[in-house]
Amino acid sequence: MSNSFGKRFVFTTFGESHGKALGCIVDGVPAGLKIDEAYIQSELDRRKPGQNEFATARKEGDVVEILSGVFEGQSTGTPIAMVIFNTNQKSKDYSNIKDLFRPGHADFTYFHKYGLRDYRGGGRSSARETAARVAAGAIAKLMLQELDISVNSGILSIDGIESKTYDFDFAKTSAIYTLDQNMESAQKEAILTAKNRHDSVGGSALVTIKNSPIGLGEPLYHKMDALLADAMMSINAVKGIEIGDGMEASKATGSENNDPIREDGFTTNHSGGILGGITNGDEITIKVHFKPTPSIFQTQKTVDIHNHEVECALKGRHDPCVAIRGSIVAEAMAALVTADMLLLNMGRTIDNLKASYNKSK
């Protein structure tokens, strides 16, 4: 099982939903980066469960502890290890399904691939693993801040109710991280209606990367958009992503979809900031689409590990809309991809290499 992501800025996650702890090891962080532990914790606080009625009732503080790689507030250039201890597991909630496959979950595929599975909340397949990604993403964002590159996210739609305006500052204050305060009430109502029906709803998030330099990404097999797609599709419940106009581009003509170029840059941004897999200096825009949370409190038909048809009745605590907290994870993954690409891009020409090693005159 592969648990690592990245080539130069690499992170590896570990731990299970109902295990003692989960965490990550971040390797490739340049020495001398100021590590703001309060900032890292604030990022985890945005993702943590149990904050309101729109999220799972599981109460986890998600308190992060740095174990290595930091000395006197700065990165040392060695691996940064971080751990988050689980404090509110209720494994008994899953005892009635230990031999059942939950519809919509990875239980079926994990069992048939490995011959066993951790039924307590899904083990490694649980979205709880993403807390470690947000911790790693916070390190990446600290590095990006040094270069004036910012990554933001917000909810674009809930249950098909679309945000019409994109206000990332408002999203940071919204209980559901929506981008449009005029749509917030309707989106909240859709979530609570589904929750009261013991059901769930899907949603979409918008992630942007601002002030990215021209040139990130490789021309063929390590394209910026391909890596972003890889990163987003690795998040639980993500079923699709779009860069720039995405699917709408397939309905346009070339004259409509092309972005005219002027002395001061592009006049439109249908490409979403990426051309030929390489960033063009414009804002990178990514739409991330999440399916409805598969854990619902309605009786569903399934089979057990012996392939006998049975009924599945779930207990436990689950998000009625996984897209809300998932948007924070998508933001972290975008930051991690960007950090990795920045380090890879440093050796793109001999002049860049010489500039790193030649002493200034």
Image (tube, helix red, strand yellow):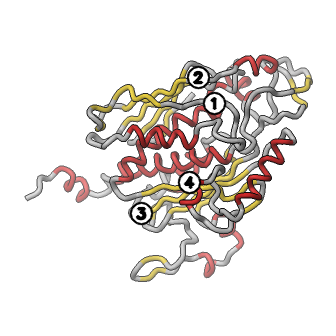
**Mark 3 vs mark 2: which is more N-terminal?**
2
x and y percentages locating residue 88 in the rendered image:
63, 23
Write the residue at 90% across / 31% down.
299
Which x, y percent locates residue 310? 91, 23
**How far is disc 2 from disc 4 in space, using C-alphas?**
26 Å
Left or right, 312 with respect to 273, comes to: right
Q: Closer to the camera: disc 3 or disc 2?
A: 2
Q: Which residue is mark 1?
A: 59
**Dot 3, how many residues are within 10 Å of its Cα: few (below 14), some (14-19), or many (20+)?**
some
Question: In this picture, is 93 found above or below 217?
Answer: above
Look at the numbered disc 4 and give the secondary structure of its residue: helix
CA distance separating discs 3 and 4: 20 Å
List the residue tagged with mark 3: 211
Dot 2: element? loop
Quadrant containing the N terminus is: top right
Residue kind at label 4, given as amino acid type: Lys
Tell me, yes or no, if residue 241 can be seen here: no
The numbered mark at residue 87 is 2
Specify the amino acid type for callout 1.
Lys
* Front one among 177 and 314: 177
Q: Nearer the viewer, residue 349 or 127?
A: 127
List x then y, in percent, for residue 126: 65, 31
Residue named by callout 4: 172
Which type of secondary structure does the marked residue at label 3 adopt? loop
